[in-house]
Each structure stands twice: as structure tokens, then as C-alpha cells.
Amino acid sequence: MVVRLDAGRDAVRAYVQEHASRGLRHVRSLIADDNNKLFTLIGDLSEEESRAVTSANEWSVFETLRHLSASLDRGKTRLEVLSSGQPYVSPPMTAGQMGDVEYASFDELRRACEAVIAAIDVVLERADPARGLELTAEHIAFGPFNWLEWAVYSHHVHIHDHIGQIEAICGQLRA
């Protein structure tokens, strides 16, 4: 079972460190499974459904995916820098930030997410699993992570949390 973000700093850090310690192949498998689940969930949503706000969540699927798109893009840059053995300084952030990119349609947003997820996979495929692990970057709530821990957190734990939101929204849309 994936740790919930509201389980607290110690629980999230322990989960992230445990899975990162299993190595890059394991981490890539976790990420791939979550990405497949995400795109299966949203694959047949219409534009109207993607923008519906339900009582299950204050965000629509569109807004949740927009937040993920911004997060994924930042995560890709962080992974590139840290896994290359260079220090990374996080830009100022606030939790839940949506990002500045406007998307004309849900389809455009979905394609943008697919593209950044594919780019993240390339970064992880090329990463040397032993390089740069001594370097860390701060998370606003959970403290310092090295690049492999960031991969677990950003591209598995964080995504999984939003998959839960999307599942709840889709459940209400289809009820």
C-alpha cells in the first residue's frame, strides 16, 4: 500500500527511503504502474467530464492534471540536475500550486502530461543509479531527498495521491 501524504513526514520519508533503497529498476516499475493507472482512468473522459467539479474533490480532473503537469515538469528538471551529479536548488513553491501554463483543452493537457512522463522515463533510463545520490534537494514539507528518493516521492507517492482524487471524481461522474 502506498503511503498517504497525510500520514506525516516520518511515514512519508520512511516509505520513500524504503522504495528508493530497492533500486532504480524497482522505482521505474512503481512509476510506470502509476502512470498506466492514471492514463487508464482519464483515457475516455470528455472535455465536460474533465472540468466537472464534484463533491468528491474541490478540484476537477482537469485541474488535478494541470497541477500534476506542472509538478512533473519541475520533477523532470530536478531529476536531470541531481542525477547528473549537480546540486539543485528548488525554486520558491507553495503546496498545491497549479502552474502557469494554460491548456486549450483536456486533450492538449493529457498530451502534455504524456510527453513529460515520457521525458522523465528517458531521464531515469539514462541515469547512473550510483551517481549523485549524496546530493539532496529540499521538499517543502518532507525535507531533503536525493534524486532517486525524489523519483519515488514525486513520480509515485505524489501521483498516487492524485490518482485517488481522480478515482473519487470519476466514481461520482459515473454514478
Image (cartoon, rainbow, N blue to C red):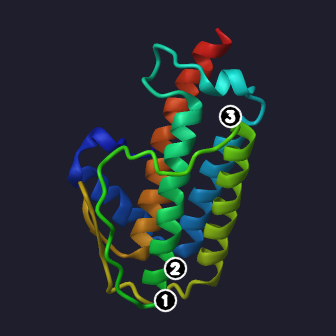
Position of residue 7 measured from the top left corner of the image (x, y, whole percent): 27, 41
Check disc 2: other Cα within 10 Å, few if <14, some if 14-19, many if 20+.
some
Question: Badge 2 is on which residue?
Answer: 80
- Rounded to the nearest whole Å, what is the CA distance between mark 2 and mark 3? 28 Å
Q: Which residue is drawn at 50% across and 73% down?
A: 77
Q: Which of marks 2 and 3 is nearer the N terminus?
A: 3
Please tell me whether mark 1 sits on a helix, a strand or a loop.
loop
Name the residue nearer the viewer: 84 or 102. 102
Q: Which of marks 2 and 3 is in front?
A: 2
Query: x, y percentage for residue 21?
Result: 41, 72
Mark 1 in CB contact with mark 2 (< 8 angstroms): yes
Tell me the quadrant of the picture where the N terminus can be found.
Answer: top left
Viewer-proximal residue among 171 and 68: 68
Q: How many residues crowd mark 3 within 10 Å: few (<14), some (14–19), many (20+)? A: some
As displayed, is residue 71 above or below residue 91?
above
Q: Residue at x 60, y 66 (%)?
A: 28
Residue 80: x and y in percent read 51, 79
Marks 1 and 3 sit apart, C-alpha to C-alpha, by: 33 Å
- Hey, what amino acid is under mark 1? Ser
Which quarter of the picture shows residue 82?
bottom left
Q: What secondary structure is found at the residue carrying circle 2?
A: helix
The disc placed on residue 84 is 1
- Which circle marks residue 41 in the picture? 3
Q: Position of residue 76 (x, y in %)?
A: 53, 69
Disc 1 packing (10 Å; few <14; some 14–19; many ≥20): some
Amino acid type, label 3: Leu
